[in-house]
Image: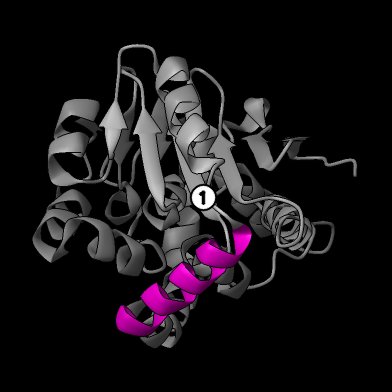
Amino acid sequence: MNYETLQVRLQDSICFVQFDRPQANNTINQRLVEECHQVLDACENSATVIVFSGNAEVFCFGADFQGIRDRSVNPAGAADEGGPDRLYDLWLRMANGPFVTVAHVRGKVNAGGVGFVAAADIALADESAKFSLSELLFGMIPACVLPFLVRRIGFQRAHYLTLMTQPIGVEQAHAWGLVDAWEAQSETLLRKHLLRLRRLSATALGRYKRYVNEIVPALHSCRQAALSTNTEVFSDPRNIQDIVRYVETGAFPWEA
């Protein structure tokens, strides 16, 4: 299939998915979410490992502020982005689907990009990786990210990242469990993991992931609260105004 926002290739039982919106810092729009769902649909019967990556500078930088600005300025001509449910359900599928999901992180990871990392079964990174949750700076809340992040690193560390809004480096991320393994150059690290993971059978993986979903059910129980809170903050006119101003002038909400 041809994709607008992704580069996808299948190699034996491994599917490589690269976010391909470099002009927009690999930010998340509805097209990217839907195309990721399409990839997972295909992978349920053809792949046992799915590797998500960005480019060398940016893995994924979260919500598409330019798209939010465009819809605010010209709502009649803007594409309908829908609600947050499809993104949350995408991360649920990454966490619970019958395959191993790997986040291969280089460069900046912000906001919803952290959601992709937290939802993945395994997170690998190189020395350039930096992770941040910037939502509160714009009156937002990382509502959909937090259930996945808390499951991965615990409440207090996720709480700290949310409140401080500043990036942490790969060493800190590894110490906290957000990253499972890292090396200065992560391509070799990724190959080593894939050599091992490709030995796992699809049947065994499916059974294991179903079992994990039963004993760690919090992601499903948090879904409605995450969606309603996300909808609330993204429909607040003041928040939208601050985002539009930031896109147009580069000024943060607290700046005169």
Determine if residue 32 is in view: yes
Query: In front: 29, or 205?
Result: 205
Residue at image position (38%, 61%) is 145
Query: In front: 202, or 78?
Result: 202
Residue at image position (42%, 54%) is 115
Instruction: Report the residue that reaches farthest toward the top.
Output: 185
Residue 93 x/y as whole percent: 56, 67
Residue 2 x/y as whole percent: 89, 40
Q: Main SS of the magenta segment?
A: helix
On screen, 24 above or below 65?
Answer: above
Going by the image, does 223 lie left or right of 199? left
Residue 18 x/y as whole percent: 64, 34
Residue at mark 1: 101
On screen, 121 above or below 51?
Answer: below
Total marks placed? 1
- Dividing the picture into quarters, in which one does residue 182 lie? top left
Q: Residues within 10 Å of mark 1 (few under 14, many from 20)?
A: many
Label 1 sits on a secondary structure element that is strand
* Quadrant in which the C terminus appears: top left
Residue at image position (12%, 53%) is 160
Going by the image, does 206 lie left or right of 67? left
Residue 14 in magenta?
A: no
Q: Which residues are magenta?
A: 202-217
Residue 211 in magenta?
A: yes
